[in-house]
Image (cartoon, grey):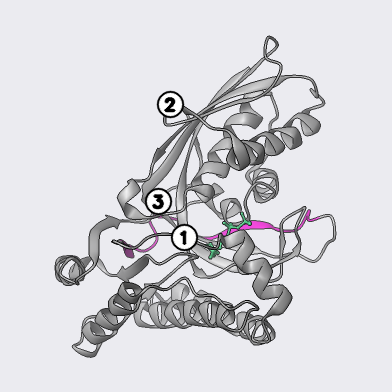
Amino acid sequence: MKGTAKAHTNIALIKYWGKRNDALILPTNSSLSLTLDGFYTKTTVEFRRDLSSDLFLLNDQAVSGQAYERVSRFLDLVRKLSGEENIYAEVNSRNEVPTAAGFASSASGFAALAAASTRAIGLELSDEELSILTRQGSGSACRSIYGGFVEWQMGEREDGLDSRAVQVAPEDYWDVRVAAVELSSTMKKVSSREGMKRTVDTSPFYSGWLEAIPNDLMQLKAAIKEKDFEKLGAIAEANCLKMHATTLGANPPFTYWHDTTVRVMHAIQEMRSKGIPVFFTIDAGPNVKALYLPEHEEVVKSMLENIPGVTSVTLSRTGKGISYL
Ligand code: DP6
């Protein structure tokens, strides 16, 4: 009863920011991401009759506390789905997310866990069913089931059975590149889970965020269809700014930006004013991701590396969906 799977992380161009149901992880808005080949998690799950509780090892280190609980709660869902309720698993995960890249690993982590654990317990799920299950581990992870450009359609049902990812375009459709820019000050004080909850509950700007989503999504899909990079970048950057604006209106207010975050944003905009099409997006932390085309890779990389406070720049191409090993 053993399965191994590999999943890549993804970066949202239209962000998922807010839940309408915390337990099922149902979002308040649809989102759209790009799966990245540079960063992935490889996970082996083995269900064993001799275990009396789950074991979780990440990069060969036993994990306990909240991270362990999230994995074990997720395995409960898999056990329930399979009808095998009294069997525990050893989970071995390896994050090939260069720690320096400053990427959250929950997207690739839960996608790999979902694929490996369902395979191990003998469930044969379609990609759609796997995406619905993965969503309940971590929302953004449901997009990592697929490669390339992926939309998480929020759905309408209360049971969440229509809230899942669909592929908009495969990984070989368009060679858009992403540079993950890590900053020296990377302390994350508010998790994405907590940050989005506080924003939904208290920020008067949250309704403006929701109002903007349908048009942003429509424009982004058109940009992907037309392979219009300037349009894609402009929409992604503006959508990220709108998401981060909601946090300033929260109670208590907060921001994920550090001084260097703002410096990198300005440097990217400055570069653009000189004719290089490069755009930024930022998740629930201070690090910045730059979007650019292959012909500008060298100039973008050296510009980013030379910004004071930047500790590393890791380049990535579009990545594949889930694979079984
Ligand atoms: C800002 O997927 O980490 O990265 O569903 O609570 O596990 P949970 O949250 P998570 O949130 C990601 C938020 C984001 C935007 C995005 O990836 O769409």
Q: Residues within 10 Å of mark 2 (few under 14, many from 20)?
A: few
* Contact between labelled residues 3 and 2, with CB atoms less than 8 Å apart: no
* Contact between labelled residues 3 and 1, with CB atoms less than 8 Å apart: no
Q: CA distance from mark 2 to mark 3?
A: 25 Å
Task: Please give the label number shown on residue 64.
Answer: none
Disc 1 is placed on an element classified as loop
Q: Which residues are magenta?
A: 160-180
**Residue furthest toward the bottom?**
273
* Residue nearer the viewer, 203 or 166: 203
Residue located beneath label 3 in the image = 319
Which amino acid type is marked by label 3? Gly
Does residue 177 show up magenta in the picture? yes
Which numbered disc, 2 or 3, marks the residue closer to the eye? 2
Quadrant location, ligand no. 1: bottom right
Give the mark, 1 or 2, whose residue is nearer the N terminus.
Answer: 2
* Residue nearer the viewer, 2 or 302: 302
* Residue 90 higher or lower than 282, as above or below: above
Which numbered disc, 1 or 2, marks the residue closer to the eye? 1
**Residue furthest toward the front?**
252
Q: Quadrant of the N terminus?
A: top right
Give the mark, 1 or 3, whose residue is nearer the N terminus.
Answer: 1
Quadrant of res 305? bottom left
Q: Residues within 10 Å of mark 1 (few under 14, many from 20)?
A: few
Task: Please give the label number shown on residue 188.
Answer: 1
* Residue nearer the viewer, 52 or 139: 52
Residue located beneath label 2 in the image = 60
Give the mark, 2 or 3, whose residue is nearer the N terminus.
Answer: 2
